[in-house]
Image (tube, rainbow, N blue to C red):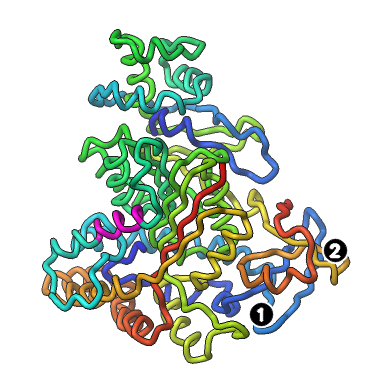
Amino acid sequence: MKATLAPSSLISLPRHKVSSLRSPSLLLQSQRPSSGLMTTTTASRGSVAVTAAATSSVEALREGIAEFYNETSGLWEEIWGDHMHHGFYDPDSSVQLSDSGHREAQIRMIEESLRFAGVTEEEKKIKRVVDVGCGIGGSSRYIASKFGAECIGITLSPVQAKRANDLAAAQSLSHKVSFQVADALEQPFEDGIFDLVWSMESGEHMPDKAKFVKELVRVAAPGGRIIIVTWCHRNLSPGEEALQPWEQNLLDRICKTFYLPAWCSTSDYVDLLQSLSLQDIKCADWSENVAPFWPAVIRTALTWKGLVSLLRSGMKSIKGALTMPLMIEGYKKGVIKFGIITCQKPL
Amino acid sequence: MRLITHNMLSCNIKGVTNGFPLKIEAEKVVEKEVDFNPDFLRHMFAKIEWKALVEAARSMGYAELPEDSPDATVIESADETFLRKLHHALLELHLEEGALVCPETGRKFPVNKGIPNMLLHEDEVKQTVCIDLRKGNEPTRIRSPKDRVLMQDVCIDLSLQVP
């Protein structure tokens, strides 16, 4: 996740405020004048129907995400460096880590994800990689170096793309990595060109999980691997149709500030991949392995440097920082899970 | 934007079947030196769409690449003349300002400060729908796994893409 020092969001959904975006399941009726489709709405079991206003709210969401990261990426980079994702820690590690300890944990997150997906044994086969939701390119540069592969990253934020390219140039990696402004839901690539499809903490921002997964699968090469690391809510029990109201309420408060359109569970991702006939689908709950992260982010926010930067950054960041304890509460109460889902596209 | 990147980009507007390769309208091209790395070039060569690269290089003012893709012996040989040309075209030419143009629709994707903006407008975007049998076969948009589960008994064809 491009979790900045204050992973904040717009305080309210812009203009087309659509309450159903917080519902885990929703039905959207398509309203395209050119094809003359109907516009009646349907509600079913806990889902709320939305009108065409929602489709333009998706554009508004996209703009909002871009603006947010345009403004806050620099702040995150100053304090935490170029990896905008959780660190991977040994469970129950009570040792308070130094800054460099946390940076190592962030690198370890990349390595553990690759290993979980079974990628490390296939190094020679990896020639092209896509980093979906690339931030300022930390993962891309790391993976491109590791495999000697070509890596292309996409982000909604032009500021992030520029910074990512500048960092690549500074590290003499420009020949291997490049970054563009593009939408993960409409990836500007031909089918089947990437040996590795990487999505590190960007899934949370996708308003349409089904479409997001479809695009990841589309651009993966036959035999290629897909790695999704993302914030989820807990799996629902059999017969359970939705989260408990208090759980939904907690997530809603986080969505508001962190600019997340919707949550789903790890098993929802597994279902989507199964429906698209992917093979070797694996998933895991790494919540225990990321537990030290948010407390560490809060600690850095409370340092002299952190406070000054926050104040300089403005209200969005400050409100976001005040919401970070909700993430800790979510994890502690088992509502929020840090999930990894990986699979392979059949040959 | 370098041509190694251009070689992967395509137009994803709904209904477009021939979105690759994007034509280049070059307003500002800059040459930036990059260390020559023959092993990397050899590693990547098989993945390059050759004709697309030749045409793109020409649009950027470089016409030294052969029309036809050379065979493996040329790539593997110790004579690095060809590899140096490939290196220059693929990695050292930058499109700083200009546009990438969809070959089918003519739609222009702007390139500013070396970064292409490939974002589609709302009306260029595909929808994933199912056909709702209860509603006289109306397409209903599927946005989440739960939608799919809710709709699967009343829908057919859960993977249509419609305009």
Q: Does the magenta stretch include residue A267?
A: no
Name the mark nearer the viewer: 1 or 2: 2
- The x, y position of residue A148, in whole percent, is 31, 36
- The x, y position of residue A76, in whole percent, is 25, 62
- The x, y position of residue A164, in whole percent, is 31, 47
Q: Is residue B116 above or below residue A239?
A: above
Q: Do the residues labelled 1 and 2 touch (CB within 8 Å)?
A: no
The chain ID associated with circle 2 is B
Q: Is residue A156 visible?
A: no
Judging by the rendered image, the residue that carries numbered circle 2 is B137
SS under mark 1: strand
Q: Would residue A197 be found to the left or right of residue A5 on screen?
A: right
Which numbered circle lies on residue A200? none
- Amino acid type for the residue under numbered disc 1: Val
Q: Nearer the viewer, residue A272 or B117?
A: A272
**Which stretch appears magenta?**
A106-115
Q: Is residue A106 visible?
A: yes
Q: Quadrant of the N terminus of chain A?
A: bottom left
Q: Which of A274 and A32 is in front in this view?
A: A274
- Give the residue drawn at x 55%, y 37%: B10
The chain ID associated with circle 1 is A
- Amino acid type for the residue under numbered disc 2: Asn
Other residues around mark 1 within 10 Å, as few (<14) / some (14–19) / many (≥20) = many
Q: In this view, does A75 lie above or below B81?
A: below
Q: Which of B148 and A30 is in front in this view?
A: B148
Q: Quadrant of the C terminus of chain A?
A: top right
Judging by the rendered image, the residue that carries numbered circle 1 is A48
- Give the residue drawn at x 54%, y 81%: A236
- The x, y position of residue A180, in whole percent, is 42, 44
Q: In this view, does A71 lie above or below A131?
A: below
